[in-house]
Amino acid sequence: MNITAISSFLNNQQESLRPFASNASALQEILSDYQTKLHRWQQEEQTLNIGIMGQVKAGKSSFLNALLFDGVPILPEAATPKTANLTKVIYGGQYSLEVEYYSQEEWQAIAQLAAQSGDSDREKVARELVAMARQHDEHVNGKDKETFFADDLQGLQGLLNQYTGNDGDYTARVKSTVLTLPDEKLRGFAVVDTPGMNDPVQSRSQKTRDYMAESDVVFFLSRCSQFFDESDVQLLFQQLPAKGVKRLVVVAGQFDSAIQDDGYDRDSLTETTTNLHKRLRGVAGDKMAELRRHQQEKDNPRLAAILTQLADPIFASTFAYGFAHWPEEKWGTSMRHTYGQIQDMAEECWGEPITQPEWLQIANFDALIGQYQQARKDREALLLAQREGVERETAEQLQQWRTGFTQTIQQRIHLLSSQDLQSLEKQQAGFKKRISSIANELENIIDDVRLHASRESQKMLNTLSSERQEYSRQHTRTGSRTVRQSYEESDSTWYKPWTWGDTRTVYYTSTENYEYMLATDAIEQVREYGNRCAASLRDHVNQLLDPLTLRSNLRKALLPHLDTASDDFDPALFKSTLNGVIDNLKLPELDLTLGDAAAVIPDSGEIKQRDEMDRLRKMQEQALANVLEQLRSNLARGVDNVLSQMAQLQSSLEDKLTSSIQAELDAVRMALANKEQEKQAYQQLLAQVTAL
């Protein structure tokens, strides 16, 4: 679509278009809609959304600092779960930090959790947050958000340390942050670093899931030393969304530590890395099969397919990247210590230290960057297809407008060529005789659509109600825990009678499995059911009110009234005007909005007791019933609103037809005073329209 040509046409032909105000307005609307879609495509949809997942201390911040900031520790590392933060990094015109605090209700929930006597991670974290926040409440109370600006990265780093650092004054009260950087490497990217723990606040857990659902690519970091342990599996269960994610990249991080541990039993670096790759890929394959099986049981084939990517992890090391790229004065204490230990091991076991090319091999950042680049290529292909779709749709709209406006101009030229004032009066009188029957015919079509939409929407709602059962199923999960046990054994010696009968306690540990349920599973199922129901109803009803079909039916209804000509009524004179009225009818759309029906389910971590599991099932049933009730209520209001607008459309149709024909005849009457000059102007305008 040539925006410049259309804009020039609208600007340069203002005088010629004055008699065709509705046509000019329709073209302006097509242009504005296209520009809006193009702007959204350029500003929002072009962004590749990347989510970073992993447990606390998995190295997410170091990974991002190396990938985005050449190792400069801009993002503070979370030392404990209480300081893990939800951080979004985006491109912007200046250095800034937007901080969102916990709301009063959310902080009260944390305080209530902290007051409980339990020993779960959630309760421990809540107690640490409350203790950490006490001395700084006065600064934060009453504030929802704050935005701070800095002159450079160093200034921004200082702000981050205050609001997200391990010892930050306000870290405990911060719910999430958005970091804006004028860095060209970030243009087209949005990176979200997520907390790697069960968040003590349900709303923040949900915000993490919402962010992840917007991610095109997810990088999941797992430490090689504890590769895909139970905590990693639980995190994937809870945070990896069922929709949205197109690619999952597993990073077996801190590979340098695994080499240090395994290298003493190998003869070379190559043998060490080969052994680690084989062993850890085996672990990844087993966990992938377990997770896929769970998703298939939940009838979630799309997420099950994405999880196949778990079996092919990328082995990487941020420290090794630093050893290969950064001068030694930039290394931190941990890096120096790790470097010394690995090199000592290499010289002792392999006879020579690790070289700079070998550090690059261990770092393996080229593979990570390759995943970035491939994702970007795939994203660009998708965006290109989306843009081509917008272009195609707009071209069709423009062609429809061009056809309609061409007919309107030709109709005007024909009227000027074939009519005079007396014959125009006769045509107007003939039209008035037929206007009521024409309007009634069109109203009957609209009325049929109204009744059909009302009836079918109720049928659809009944179908969705019957599908509720599949969303009420709650599968239990299997966890494992280490149990310390003991037994008594004899501690006597046969030749020492005084020891006869003595015993000693021997302690040992064993692993036992247990079943549990997660409230987050129930919450996700309720929200998925609500979103699916709302989308199905909205699409279904809007399909019944499809503008193209309805306008086509309205045009067909005109045919019997336009097929018979008489001396006092030439239907060809008014066909373009009548079609224009139909094309410009503003047809309503159904809008369905739902509240959060899942709010009745508290996010309470692992649920192991049978009575608590039953209670969760009942709450899930109640939440699903709430979804359906909200849908019934909102659907009734939404359909009533649509039908009301359709009724208004019916009642105003005759007036619209009459006023449009009257406006056309009035324009012709004025043009008859200077017939030849007007016809020439219309011919020139017609040429301009054809050229668009």
Image: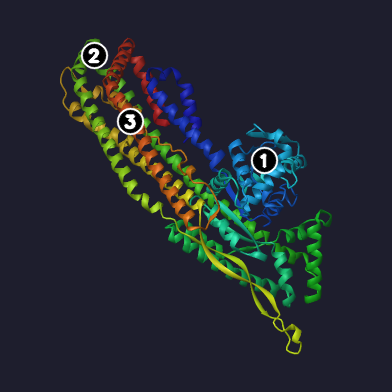
Q: Which mark is residue 470?
A: none
Q: Amino acid at mark 3?
A: Asp
Q: Is 575 situated left or right of 287 in this image?
A: left
For residue 640, the mark is: 3
- Classify 10 Å Cα crowding around label 1: few (below 14), some (14-19), many (20 and above): many
Compared to 131, does 574 lie above or below? above
Q: Which residue is mark 2?
A: 424
Kindly indicate the quadrant of the structure image that contains residue 360: bottom right
Residue at 77% from the left image edge and 64% from the top image edge: 356
Tell which of 49 and 690 is nearer to you.
49
Distance Cα–Cα, label 3 vs label 1: 45 Å
Residue 431 occupies quadrant: top left
Badge 3: few (under 14), some or many (20 or more) residues near its Cα, within 10 Å?
Answer: some
Q: Is residue 121 above or below residue 111?
A: below
Kindly indicate whether the residue at mark 3 contacts the one at mark 2 (C-beta within 8 angstroms): no
Where is residue 491? Give x, y as percent.
71, 81
Residue kind at label 2, given as amino acid type: Leu
Residue 178 seen = no
Q: Can you say whether 34 is above or below 512 in the image?
A: above
Label 2: element kind: helix
Q: Position of residue 353 (x, y in %)?
A: 80, 70
* Among the two numbered marks 2 and 1 on one chain, the one whose residue lies closer to the N terminus: 1
Q: Which residue is mark 1?
A: 173
Q: Position of residue 315 (x, y in %)?
A: 65, 64
Q: Between disc 2 and disc 3, whose residue precedes?
A: 2
